[in-house]
Image (cartoon, rainbow, N blue to C red):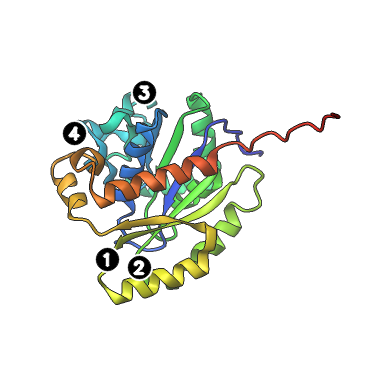
Amino acid sequence: MAQAVLTMPVIAVIGAKGGVGKTTVAANLGTTLAETGHAVLAIDLDPQNALRFHLALDREACETGLAGVLAGRANWTQAMQPGRGGVVLLPFGAIDDEHQIDLERHLADHPGWLAETLARFQLPPDTLVLLDTPPGPSVYLQQAPRVAQLCVVTVLPDAGSFATLPLVDRMIDKYCRGRADFVADLYLVNQVDAGKRLNRDVLQALRHELGDRLLGVVHQDQAVCEALASAVDVRRYAPFSEAAEDFAQCARQILRRLAPPAPLAENRRP
């Protein structure tokens, strides 16, 4: 069966391993992109249901989520929640072990589920859909690159993250690079401490390895943790902080990559 055709840009935030701050990156990119005037729908594909801690105005309302819709307890309109910074949040929702096994079996049997679901939403074409995904191989992660026009891979400036680059590259090759609508895979280096030599060395190696696939860096900044504790995104908590500017630069690069190419000027005779 042919995959559903999507008219809105989809950005998947992915990571080959846990502990890289991927959900924090997804949340802050979402609110920063919303500042540019775009409607943003942030979807949590991780059973940990953690994106709500960053974006939800009412965490208790996030118990239903997409898991609840698939279990027949709610519809999509009920599952979506208004989020911080103007973002609309579709949380994963609470789920027990038995229903999670059923859900994972369903996703494995329906690889086009996410594309079909997004197509049914009939979102305006200028809506940005942002997907937060669990780390490592899973049926949830496999859904995301199948529909994403842009994959933002979150890594740390350490040897472990550098070693995961071939794993991510193989996944992008498998699910993305053969698609006509795929734009790019971009890497965001998170929690960079310029005062540490190892961070500087790994970042230099990543710049050499990735070239123009390096989206940008987010420096280690206490404002990020303080913003989360204060239930607000970092650009509202500390708008002039280093991390806030880092996220703004990354958001600008994402929009530049997603912008349609300028039409070629017609050749005209003088």
Check whether the beta carbons of the residues at disc 2 and disc 1 lie within 8 A of each other.
yes
Which of marks 1 and 3 precedes in the sequence? 3
Residue 120, position as x, y percentages in the image:
51, 26
Q: Which mark is residue 77?
A: 3
Quadrant the C terminus occupies: top right
* Local secondary structure at mark 4: helix
Which of marks 3 and 2 precedes in the sequence? 3
Instruction: Report which residue position mark 2 lands on.
Output: 157
Residue 196, position as x, y percentages in the image:
26, 73
Q: Residue at x 63, y 38 (%)?
A: 261
Under mark 4, the amino acid is Glu
CA–CA distance between discs 2 and 3? 40 Å
Q: In the image shown, does 121 or 264 lie closer to the viewer? A: 264
Residue 244, position as x, y percentages in the image:
28, 46
Under mark 3, the amino acid is Thr
Query: Counting other residues with Cα less than 10 Å from the Cα at mark 4, is it few (<14), some (14-19), or many (20 or more)?
Result: few
Under mark 2, the amino acid is Pro
CA–CA distance between discs 1 and 4? 35 Å
Residue 95 in view in this figure: no
